[in-house]
Amino acid sequence: MSKAPNIKTQIKAPNFQEATFLLTGTAPYVSNKFSAEAREMMRAKQAAGTQSKKGSAREPKDFDRCFRESMHTTADGHHGVPASCFRQAMVSACRIVGFKMTLAKLALFVKADGFDADDASPLVLFERGKPSKFESATRNETGVADIRARGKWEPGWQIRLCIRYDADMFTETDVLNLLSRVGEQVGIGAGRPDSKSSCGQGWGTFSVTA
């Protein structure tokens, strides 16, 4: 019998490290969760199938409920930001520095502090700051004007963010500088500078301390 070829392993083991940063809001953070009410309405329309909308009554909007459901909240009442928001923002910031976004998706991860009680989204919790009800005019995807009530955290809010990163692709300084660009140029939440549909309101920016 012939012997198996002597194959030399070329693939290195993963080399992940962790770094923790303190984020301090330099502008308001405005939450924009897809609410349970909106999901219920969407489900009801889909369940109705091709039934006509004519003659259907329009339910009055409960702005207090909209405010509550715009925020990501754990079962024990703590508010947070989806961990995915920070990860997506860091990947987006890679465009600024010429780093491949497809590689960054495989190298940068955010550790969650808890989970949303409603949709199970992994959350990073606020260490400082309390939300207040904030009503503003906006436009739906159809272009129709709307009034939305959302949670707003005033500047000075704080989040402690723990990032797991591939140390064969990034150094801790790289992660710090990339996150700093997120805070200055990308932002998080509604009205952020890197909004998909507009130039934003300048909300969701922050400073970073290692």
Image (spheres, rainbow, N blue to C red):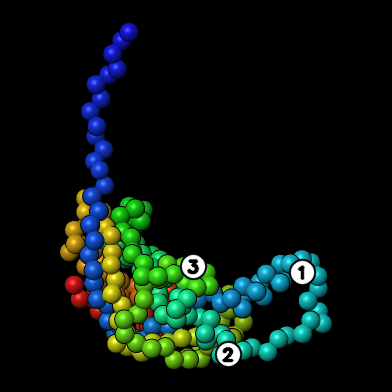
Mark 3 vs 2, N-terminal side = 2
Residue at image coords 23%, 68%: 20
Neighbours of disc 3 within 10 Å: few (<14), some (14-19), many (20+):
some
In the image, residue 176 sits, relative to residue 68, either above or below, namely above
Toward which corner of the image does residue 4 lie, by quadrant? top left
Distance, label 2 to label 1, CA atoms, is 25 Å
Label drawn at residue 120: 3
Identified by mark 1, the residue type is Ala
Q: Nearer the viewer, residue 99 or 162?
A: 162
Image coordinates for residue 102, horizontal then vertical, percent = 36, 53
Q: Between tags 3 and 1, which lies in front?
A: 3
Identity of the residue furthest to the top in this view: 1
Identified by mark 2, the residue type is Phe
Please say if the residues under marks 2 and 1 sit with CB atoms less than 8 Å apart.
no
Label drawn at residue 63: 2
Image coordinates for residue 180, horizontal then vertical, percent = 25, 72
Label drawn at residue 48: 1
